[in-house]
Image: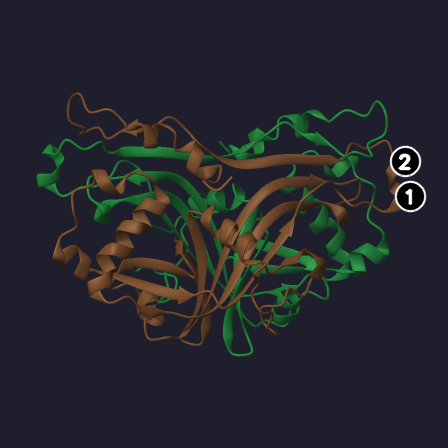
Chain colours: A brown, B green
Amino acid sequence: MSTYTRTPRSRVRRLAKRGVYDRETVHGIIDDALICHVAFVADGAPRVLPTAIARFDESVYLHGNRNSQMLRSLEDGAPACITVTHVDGMVVARAGFHCSMNYRSVVIHGSGHRVEDARKGEVLDTFVERLVPGLTADLRAPTAKEIRATTVLEFPLVEVSAKVRTGPPADDEPDYILPIWAGVVPLEMKAGRPVDDPRLGAGIEAPAYVRRYARRLAGARR
Amino acid sequence: MSTYTRTPRSRVRRLAKRGVYDRETVHGIIDDALICHVAFVADGAPRVLPTAIARFDESVYLHGNRNSQMLRSLEDGAPACITVTHVDGMVVARAGFHCSMNYRSVVIHGSGHRVEDARKGEVLDTFVERLVPGLTADLRAPTAKEIRATTVLEFPLVEVSAKVRTGPPADDEPDYILPIWAGVVPLEMKAGRPVDDPRLGAGIEAPAYVRRYARRLAGARR
């Protein structure tokens, strides 16, 4: 299976057995996400902000208003770290020390670059399509002004690792005889019933891809 | 209402109207969270990792193995940025440019310090209690060795801001007549039915606070 090369900073250190480097796992974790957290250095101090993320092939893309401080900090190749995290369960052990969470996370180290105007429309379309599969075809087409007002950054997936915890608690052997409940409370992001815009035109109904948005969250690839 | 003082780095810049600085809103967003993303600088580059978070009074606490690179980087007061994010909905507009998400986020700038051994047990108990209300009283008590193996860092809430988006899409005025559906798909973290540890002792049932964990996610304060 194709894997990312471990580097000193992409290698998982704490609980190294949870480290995963194969592309399929990394891609799946990113593709299940709606947002990531992006770290950059501003005025010498670390800063981390949430933003939407989408992957195509071996790159992830961020976008936003061209005046965004974060995008302006990163558009000329300043070092960044992009992390995607899913919390899949609360792990209740017999001792606080072994209580944990089940999770899937990906950490991407590297630098981004601006997507040029000629390619931006296509990337933005695909971005929308990743977040709400089916939506792109229904939207009013973007204007040249909107595209100019949007910065799109591409970060190639080079220094990348995933970390995954699944399964029951791992208690100390003598604790298994204690009369204490232990197990996992599964956690999952769920979509509720779509809420119409109060200004929605008469007779317009939510399309199937919106009514069944839960499928997107459950992972299109699964 | 009591508010945090805005500083050049805590002031919300992009879409400043979404900035919120009152303590009640900030506390509520942190208290609804299970995890945060912590940014620090390692070897001159930004790094961001997910970890559990709990707030008491005007501090947030992080904890983990004392060998954790992140905790070791931060225990002596290196600058950090801690961000908590909830995605509350996918905002589907009539144009891609106005598609968005509803969210609540908090960004904390500052430095942490180690909680001393004498206070660590109490803080860890309260930490567990924040993540799974009711659990602390049922757990096997922590050992001195476990407490020594755990680093707990306290970050006072000083430079803090929240950013919140709620409500329907904000389309361009001429687009409201287009025959396109628009609205919000609500998103929420949900708890499933607890899964017993395969090694659970006979006759031990999940306590009520585990079976009703969904309440914790829905926000204890609400």
In this view, which residue lies farthest toward the front?
A: A1
On the question of residue B194 being in view, the answer is yes
Residue situated in front as seen by the camera: B158 or A193: A193
Nearest to the observer: residue A114 or residue A42: A114
Residue A174, numbered circle: 1
The chain to which mark 1 is attached is A
In percent of width and height, residue A155 lies at 40, 66
- Eyeballing the image, is B92 above or below B68? above
> How far, Cα to Cα, is label 2 from label 1?
7 Å
Estimate how packed mark 1 is, as few (under 14), some (14 to 19) or many (20 or more) residues with alpha carbons within 10 Å: few
The amino acid on which the numbered mark 2 sits, given as a three-letter code, is Ile
Which residue is depicted at the point 87% across and 38% down?
Answer: A176
Q: Helix, strand or loop at disc 1? A: helix
Q: Secondary structure at mark 2?
A: helix
Viewed as shown, does residue B55 lie left or right of A207?
right
Which of B29 and A222 lies nearest the eye of the viewer?
Answer: A222
Residue B150: image location, x then y, percent: 74, 59
What label sits on residue A132 in the rendered view?
none
Cβ atoms under marks 2 and 1 closer than 8 Å: yes
